[in-house]
C-alpha cells in the first residue's frame, strides 16, 4: 500500500514542478496550446480571413432577388422567337409533350444540379470545379469562357433594339420606302394600302394607275376587278414584280448596314451603330456597377416588365382579325410527328438552352444564396415559369402572325419566321398596321431590351465573379472592374458595328454557344453523380436543410446518374454528326471563316485538357504521387463559411 502511494505521488510531484500547459481561447473555446491546438488556431485564423472575404463577396439582400434574377436570366429572347417556331415546325401542340418530358429528365436536373453546386460552395464555377475534382478544374474556366462570349456578342441584339426604340419616336422609317437605303423593289404594306385607298397600285415605290401598269406590259385592263388581262388570262398588277418588304430592307440595309457586304468587303464602323452599342454597354455597366447589390434591384424591372408587355400584347393581339387562325395553327396537334426523332432532339435542345445551364451563370447566381435557402422549390418554380412563358409567348406571337396573314391575304404558314427576323422584321411590319402603332412598337422593343439584358446580366456577372474570386482585392474595386471590363468589350465589339457586322454576329452566335454547352453539361452531371458520388451530393443537399421525400430523392438520383447523362450524350453525338458549315442565308462562309468558328468553339474547350495536364504533371512531380488526389475533392471543398469549421470535427 505504502509503496503504491509513494509511486503514485511521484508523478504528481513531477507534474507540480513541471510547467503547466497554457491554454488559448479560439472563438470562445479553450484549447491547449499543443501542436494540434496551434494547427486549429492557424486554420481558424485562415477561415476568419476567408469568411471576411466571403462577406465582401456579397449575398442577395432579399429572398426574392435570386428567384427574379434567375428567372430573368432563363427567360430570354429564345422564348419569344425560338420556341413558338419549333411548336409550329413540329406539329403545334404535339411538341409540348416531348418538351415537358425533356424538361423533366434533362433540363431541370442539370439546372437544379448547378443551383445546388453554387449554393453549397458559395463560390463561382472556377473555384467549384477546382475544389470538387481538381483534374477537371478546366471546366470552370470553360463555362466562364462561354459566358464571356455570350455577353460579348449578345449585347449586339440590345443595340439593335435600342436603335429601333429611338426610331419609334423619330418617325418609324421602316413603314415606308423611298429612303436612300431602299432598292427599286422596295414594297411597303402601309404605302400599298394608302395607294389602294386612291384606286392606285404601289409599283417601284410609286402609286400608279392600273391603266399605266397594264399598258406597259401590253395587257388589257379591267377596272371593275382591278386586274390586267392577257387574252382571257387574269393577271394581278403585282405579278412578275420583285417585292422586298420595306421593313426587311430597313433592318438589313440600314440597321445592319449590310448592302451586299461580306467577309471580303466588311465595311467600316458606323456612327449610329457605335452609339447604340456604346449605350447598350453603358446600361450593362450602370446596372452591374455594384454587383448583385445593384443588379438585384434592376432585375425586378428587366424580369417582370416583359410579362406586362406580353399581357398587353395578348389583350390586343387576341382581338385582332385573323388572330384565331394563328393560334389554331400554333396549338393544333399532329400526333404522327411524335415518331420523328428530330422532334425529341429539338425539344431537349430547346429546354436545355432555354434554362441556360453550362454557362456558369446559374452557378454564379446561386452562389450568392444563403446556405440554408430552399433552392429546390426555386429551381422547379423557375423551370415551370420559363416553360409557361414560352407557351404564352407562342400564343401572343401566333395571334399577331395570324393578323398579319389576314391583312396580307395569305396563309399563316407563309409569314412565320424565327430568330431576329421575327423580332425585327415581322413584328415591326405588324405594328405599322395597328392603331397606336408607336406605343406598341415602343413597348415591344423595350421588352426585347429587358429580355436581352436579363440574360446578359447573368453572363457578365459570371465573368465578374470569376475575376473577383481569383483576385479578392478586386471586390473593393467592383465599380472600376465592371466599367473597365464593359469598356474593353465595347472596343472589341466594334467589328459588329461595321457593314458586315451581321456576319461576325452570325459567326459568334453559331460557334460560341454550340455543342460545347452540351459537353459541359454532360461533364458536370457525370462528375457530380459518378466521380464525386451521388450519395455525397445528396448528403450536401441535406446539409443545407433541404428536405425531400423518398420518391423525389429517387427521381433526382435516377436523373443525375442515368437519364440526364444519357439524353445529353445522345444530343452531343447527334450535334457532332449533324455539325455543318456556318453560313448566311444558305451561303456557306469561306474556309478560313469556318476555321475561325472552330477556333471560337475550341477556345472554350481548350482549358479542359490544359488544366488536366497541369494537374497530372504536378501530381508526378511529388515524391509519393496518388492518383486519387486528381479526382477527389480538395480540403477547400465545402461551404465557404460553415464547411471549414465543420471539417475540424471528426
Image (cartoon, helix red, strand yellow):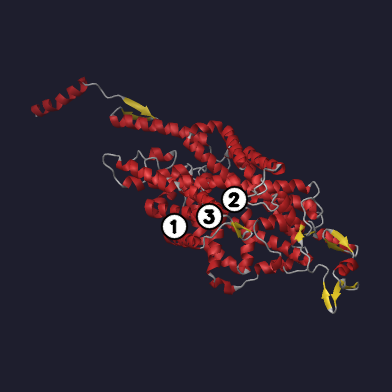
Whole-percent x and y of residue 483?
60, 35
**What SS does tag 2 mark?**
helix
Please tell me which of labels 3 and 2 falls first in the chain: 2
* Residue 296 against residue 32 in the figure, above or below: below
Element type where label 3 sits in the image? loop
Quarter of the image with the C terminus is: top left
Residue extending farthest top = 17
Badge 1 or badge 3: first in the primary sequence: 3
Is 62 or 28 nearer to us in this picture?
A: 62
Could you say where residue 69 lies in the image, as x and y percent from the top left?
A: 59, 46
Separation of marks 1 and 3 at Cα, in angstroms: 22 Å
Q: Residue furthest bottom?
A: 232
Q: Residue 71 — which label?
A: 2
* Front position among marks 1 and 3: 3
Residue picked out by circle 3: 514
Identify whether 536 is placed above or below 25: below
Please tell me how crowded label 2 is: few (under 14), some (14-19), or many (20+) other residues with Cα within 10 Å. many
Q: Which mark is residue 560?
A: 1
The Cα atoms of the two marked residues, 2 and 1, are separated by 23 Å
Q: Residue at x 65, y 68 (%)?
A: 331
Q: Residues within 10 Å of mark 3 (few under 14, many from 20)?
A: some
Tag of residue 526: none
Is the Cβ of the residue at disc 2 closer than 8 Å to that at disc 1?
no
Amino acid at each position: 500500500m505504502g509503496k503504491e502511494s509513494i509511486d503514485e505521488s511521484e508523478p504528481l510531484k513531477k507534474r507540480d514542478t513541471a510547467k503547466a500547459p497554457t491554454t488559448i481561447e479560439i472563438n470562445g473555446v479553450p484549447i491547449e496550446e499543443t501542436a494540434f491546438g496551434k494547427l486549429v488556431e492557424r486554420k481558424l485564423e485562415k477561415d476568419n480571413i476567408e469568411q471576411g472575404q466571403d462577406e465582401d463577396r456579397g449575398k442577395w439582400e432579399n429572398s426574392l432577388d435570386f428567384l427574379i434574377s434567375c428567372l430573368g436570366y432563363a427567360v430570354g429572347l429564345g422564348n419569344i422567337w425560338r420556341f413558338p417556331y419549333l411548336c409550329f415546325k413540329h406539329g403545334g401542340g404535339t411538341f409540348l409533350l416531348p418538351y415537358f418530358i425533356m424538361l423533366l429528365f434533362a433540363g431541370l436536373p442539370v439546372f437544379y444540379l448547378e443551383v445546388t453546386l453554387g449554393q453549397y460552395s458559395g463560390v463561382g464555377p472556377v473555384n467549384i470545379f477546382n475544389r470538387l475534382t481538381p483534374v477537371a478544374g478546366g471546366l470552370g474556366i470553360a463555362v466562364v469562357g462561354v459566358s464571356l462570349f455570350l455577353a460579348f456578342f449578345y449585347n449586339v441584339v440590345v443595340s439593335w433594339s435600342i436603335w429601333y426604340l429611338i426610331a419609334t419616336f423619330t418617325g418609324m422609317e421602316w413603314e415606308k420606302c423611298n429612303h436612300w437605303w431602299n432598292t427599286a423593289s422596295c414594297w411597303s404594306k402601309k404605302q400599298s394600302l394608302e395607294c389602294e385607298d386612291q384606286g392606285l397600285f404601289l409599283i417601284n415605290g410609286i402609286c400608279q394607275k392600273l391603266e399605266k401598269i397594264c399598258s406597259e406590259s401590253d395587257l388589257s385592263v379591267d377596272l371593275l376587278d382591278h386586274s390586267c388581262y392577257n387574252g382571257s388570262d387574269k393577271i394581278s398588277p403585282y405579278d412578275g414584280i420583285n417585292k422586298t418588304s420595306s421593313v426587311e430592307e430597313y433592318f438589313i440595309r440600314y440597321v445592319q448596314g449590310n448592302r451586299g457586304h461580306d467577309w471580303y468587303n466588311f465595311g467600316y464602323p458606323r456612327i449610329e451603330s457605335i452609339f447604340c452599342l456604346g449605350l447598350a454597354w453603358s446600361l450593362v455597366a450602370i446596372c452591374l456597377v455594384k454587383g448583385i447589390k445593384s443588379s438585384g434591384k434592376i432585375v425586378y424591372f428587366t424580369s417582370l416588365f416583359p410579362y406586362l408587355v406580353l399581357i398587353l400584347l395578348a389583350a390586343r393581339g387576341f382581338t385582332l382579325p385573323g388572330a384565331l387562325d394563328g393560334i389554331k395553327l400554333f396549338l393544333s396537334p399532329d400526333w404522327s410527328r411524335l415518331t420523328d426523332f428530330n422532334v425529341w432532339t429539338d425539344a431537349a435542345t430547346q429546354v436545355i438552352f432555354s434554362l441556360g445551364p453550362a454557362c456558369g451563370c446559374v452557378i454564379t447566381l446561386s452562389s450568392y444564396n444563403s446556405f440554408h435557402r430552399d433552392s429546390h422549390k426555386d429551381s422547379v418554380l423557375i423551370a415551370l415559369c420559363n416553360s409557361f412563358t414560352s407557351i404564352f409567348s407562342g400564343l401572343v406571337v401566333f395571334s399577331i402572325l395570324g393578323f398579319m396573314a389576314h391583312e396580307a391575304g395569305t396563309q399563316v404558314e407563309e409569314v412565320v419566321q424565327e430568330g431576329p427576323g421575327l423580332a425585327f422584321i415581322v413584328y415591326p411590319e405588324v405594328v405599322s398596321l395597328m392603331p397606336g402603332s408607336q406605343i406598341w412598337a415602343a413597348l415591344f422593343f423595350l421588352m426585347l431590351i429587358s429580355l436581352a439584358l436579363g440574360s446578359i446580366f447573368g453572363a457578365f456577372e459570371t465573368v465578374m465573379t470569376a475575376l473577383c474570386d481569383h483576385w479578392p482585392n478586386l471586390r473593393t474595386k467592383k465599380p472600376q472592374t465592371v466599367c473597365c471590363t464593359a469598356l474593353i468589350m465595347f472596343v472589341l465589339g466594334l467589328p459588329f458595328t461595321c457593314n458586315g457586322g451581321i456576319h461576325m454576329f452570325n459567326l459568334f452566335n453559331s460557334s460560341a454557344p454550340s455543342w460545347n454547352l452540351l459537353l459541359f453539361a454532360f461533364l458536370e452531371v457525370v462528375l457530380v453523380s459518378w466521380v464525386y458520388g451521388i450519395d455525397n451530393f445528396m448528403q450536401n443537399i441535406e446539409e443545407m436543410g433541404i428536405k425531400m421525400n423518398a420518391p423525389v430523392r429517387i427521381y433526382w438520383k435516377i436523373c443525375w446518374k442515368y437519364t440526364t447523362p444519357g439524353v445529353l450524350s445522345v444530343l452531343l453525338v447527334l450535334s457532332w454528326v449533324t455539325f455543318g458549315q456556318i453560313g448566311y442565308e444558305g451561303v456557306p462562309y469561306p474556309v478560313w471563316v469556318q476555321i475561325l468558328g472552330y477556333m471560337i468553339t475550341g477556345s472554350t474547350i481548350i482549358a479542359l485538357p490544359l488544366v488536366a495536364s497541369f494537374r497530372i504533371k504536378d501530381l508526378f512531380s511529388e515524391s509519393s504521387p496518388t492518383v486519387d488526389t486528381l479526382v477527389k475533392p480538395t480540403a477547400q471543398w465545402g461551404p465557404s463559411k460553415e464547411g471549414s469549421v465543420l471539417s475540424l470535427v471528426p
